[in-house]
Image (cartoon, rainbow, N blue to C red):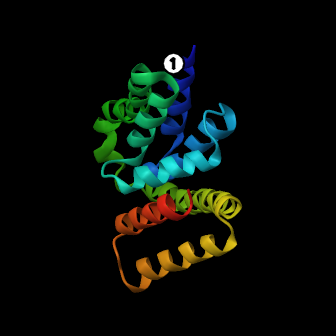
Amino acid sequence: MILLHIFWAFFIPNILGYGGGPPIIPLLQAEVVDHYGWMTLEQFGDVLALGNALPSPIATKLAGYIGYQVGGVTGAVVALIATIAPTAIAMVILFKFLQFFKSAPQVAAMTQIVRPIVAVLLGTLAFQFFASAYQSAGIWQTAALTAVSLIALEKLKIHPGLVVASAMVYGAFFLS
């Protein structure tokens, strides 16, 4: 039964997550943390941070890791299939219609409507992670990490992967 739960936990967000990885993350968090309780919000945040530091799409990394943690190797395979299947099915079915609809105003309008929704979902997720970090690390370390990360990203133009990796190293040494 756990494999069926793993499948649905990853299939539903990936079938509903229009636009790739960012819209899927809050949906996965809702399934994995809120619905099934397989991890805490802090654990999900750690997995997300680690996944963002590695190359390849975030959805497949999250599926592989969480599926493995919940159901072993078979759980990882099931989670990966559930993550990849919606896109594969959609591509097979919709590929013929791509030329007809690629410049349709409805498609452009849908994309414009989805962008603010994704922004709000990611903002909510970021706020939840910030609140979790504040509770576990304290206000001063959270504020310092936030400020240093912002400066590194915006002013110094350091690659986000290096900023995430540096924050992980800092956390491993000073927040454990």
In the image, residue 142 sits, relative to residue 43, either above or below, namely: below
In the image, residue 173 sits, relative to residue 155, either above or below, namely: above
Q: Choose between 65 and 59: the one closer to the eye.
A: 65
Q: How many marks?
A: 1
Q: Mark yes or no: residue 19 visible.
A: no
In the image, residue 80 sits, relative to residue 139, either above or below, namely: above
Q: Tell me residue 68's x, y (percent).
A: 44, 29
Q: In the displayed image of the protein, which residue is found farthest to the top? A: 1
Q: Choose between 114 and 154: the one closer to the eye.
A: 154
| Residue appearing at x 49%, y 50% in the figure | 48
Give the crowd class for mark 1: few <14, some 14-19, many >=20 residues within 10 Å: some
Residue assigned mark 1: 3
Amino acid type shown at disc 1: Leu
Residue 30: name its quadrant. Answer: top right
Q: Secondary structure at mark 1?
A: helix
| Residue appearing at x 39%, y 23% in the figure | 73
Q: Tell me residue 122's x, y (percent).
A: 57, 59
